[in-house]
Each structure stands twice: as structure tokens, then as C-alpha cells.
Amino acid sequence: MTIDGLDSIARSDDAPERAAAGVARQKEHRLQSWLRARGSALLGFSGGVDSAYLACVGVETLGAHRFLAVIGRSASYPAEQWEGARAIARQFAIPVLETPTEELDDPRYAANPTNRCYFCKSELWRRLVPMARERGLAAVIDGTNADDLADYRPGAQAARELGVESPLAELGFTKAEVRLLSRLRGIPTWQQPSSPCLSSRIPYGTAVTPERLRAVELAERALRALGVRGDLRVRYHDELARVELGRDQLALWLAPERYATLREAVRGAGFARVALDLRGFRSGSLNVLGGVSLPVIAAAGAGPSEG
């Protein structure tokens, strides 16, 4: 942890924050012991909050010669997240490699069933596990945390089948604790919104194609460039883009002038119609179109409409 981070906690008048930091630091010590017991490790590295934290602790604990972070590159992995992952690796001297993954070539994945993530993670770990063996790295790990265990994550089954370990989940790290420890270490991802793969924006049963992924990615990048902050999803519904924003951002972008710029930015990515979802961001809402009513997605003439 950085000295500044520790000092900020020590000076804080917030007793619950100090207590939470103490508990989190104890878990971090256990994580370091866990890593030392393995001796060496290869991490599946996305650059998200969890894998960035685990990468920083891993290289600090094991050293650059016994730790490796590997990024799987495909059309479903946002370029913005890749840029962030490479920046973290540079900042914290994390050894990193990249490998292409070809989950879109698997018809089982491309068909977009509810267990799509199983086929994606199977493709990833079938590449990374042999890489670890070739380099003599004892463990293959991912950034799954304890909160993830309560969610539907078919990709976790693929990890288990191939012997991938999840130390953050095993040791009981919550997402809040990972964010807190990341802040104390000065890891810039500590306040980064969660960002699952681009395929998560496409409803189950709608085929995943490079063109659809590209349209979603371009739309989200355009909205970030406009100044949208926090949670953001552009959900793909054929010619319609359904935009989900965090509650604090939703009120801001409902203003007619701002919505007009948002709509044009999304249209520029190739969508004919744009709707701003009045329920705001909801994780896992990718398979709702028929269940969305006009009061939820603002109707034509009400301002933020499909345009």
C-alpha cells in the first residue's frame, strides 16, 4: 500500500473506515501468504478492478520472474479496457503477455445461449493453462471475488474444470474490499465501473457477431467521449440501441439538449434508433426487450425517445 493511502486512513475520523481497512489488510496478508505457498502464478488479466488489484499484489509478492499476467484479445474485449490494462501493467511493472482468443469462431458461443460465458472462458483457459505449464508457473488464477459467487457465472465452471484458482473468492474478498485496497495502493482502477465483455450487451439468443460488438463498442466510446461517467451500457436490440446510465448520470442526460447529443453519438455508431432506459443501469438486463414498456423507455415525443 502507498504511504499516502495508509496516512489517509490513519488520519480519518471515520472509525468504520479504519475498521474496514484493518479487516481488508488482514485479508491482503493472507492473499500474500496464499501466493507464496503457490510459489509462482499466471493471471488471466482483463484490467478490471479485481484483476488489476490481484496483478499488483501478485508481482509485488512473487516478483516479476515468478508472476505473469496474460490478456486474452478478441472482438468481445473492449479496446478501452485493453488500453487500461496495458497502462496498469506499465505503471506497476507487471509482466504481461497477450494471446488471441477465438471464441467467436465457436458456434456454441456465437449462438449466444445463457451459458455463453462457459464457452468463452473454456477458450481462454485452454490457452492460458498450457502457457503456465510451458513457463513453469505453478498456479493459474483469476480475479473472481467473493461477491461473484452469488451471481450466475457459467464461466466459473470452465475455470474449475481446468484447475484455475480464484484466491480473492477463496479468501473472502468482497468487491468493496478490493476497491478499498486498490485505493490504498494507488491503483487507478479502484473507482472504475465494472465492465464485462461486449457480448453481454447482446440479448441471449441473438447471435454474437463482430459487427454487432463493434457497433456497441463504438457507441459506448462515443458516449464516454461526450462525458458520460460511471456505469454505462449500450444494449443491442437490432436497429435499436437501449442506453443504460447510472442514476446520477440519468437525470443529467435527460435534459433535451444533452439527450440530443447522446442520441446523435449513438446513431453515429450505426444504430437507427436510440432509447434512454428510464430505469437506469441494471447489471444483467441484456435479455430484456419484450419486457420494456413505454414508461420505462421514454416514448416518442417525451424527450429521450427512440428518435
Image (spheres, grey):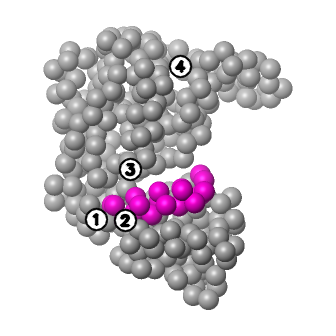
Q: Which mark is residue 78?
A: 3
Toward the bottom, the furthest residue is 301
The residue identified by callout 1 is 211
Name the kind of residue labelled 3 in the image: Pro
Left or right: where 189 falls relative to 94: right
Q: Residue at x 55, y 29 (%)?
A: 187
Which SS type dominates the magenta stretch?
A: helix
Q: Sequence order check: which comes first, mark 2 or mark 3?
A: 3
Where is residue 284? Give x, y as percent. 46, 59
Q: Rate crowding at label 2 as few (under 14), some (14 to 19) or many (20 or more) other CA atoms within 10 Å.
A: many
Between residue 132 and residue 27, name the one nearer to us. 132
Circles 2 and 1: CB atoms closer than 8 Å: yes
Over which residues does the magenta segment extend?
A: 213-230
Q: Amino acid at mark 4?
A: Glu
Q: Which residue is mark 2?
A: 215
Residue 169: tell me if it is visible. no
The image quadrant of residue 299 is bottom right
Reply above or below: 236 against 143.
below
Q: Earlier in the sequence, mark 1 or mark 4?
A: 4
Identify the residue at horizontal 16%, vertical 59% (top origin): 107
Q: Amino acid at mark 1?
A: Glu
Q: Please give the label number shown on residue 28.
A: 4
**What number is the disc on residue 58?**
none
Q: Quadrant of the N terminus?
A: top right
Q: Depth check: 277 or 220 in front?
A: 220
Q: Residues within 10 Å of mark 1 (few under 14, many from 20)?
A: few
Residue 39 place in picture, x, y as percent: 32, 11
Q: Residues within 10 Å of mark 3 (few under 14, many from 20)?
A: many
Q: Earlier in the sequence, mark 4 or mark 3?
A: 4
Amino acid found under the numbered disc labelled 2: Ala
Above or below, 256 relative to 212: below
The reply to whether the magenta stretch includes residue 29 is: no
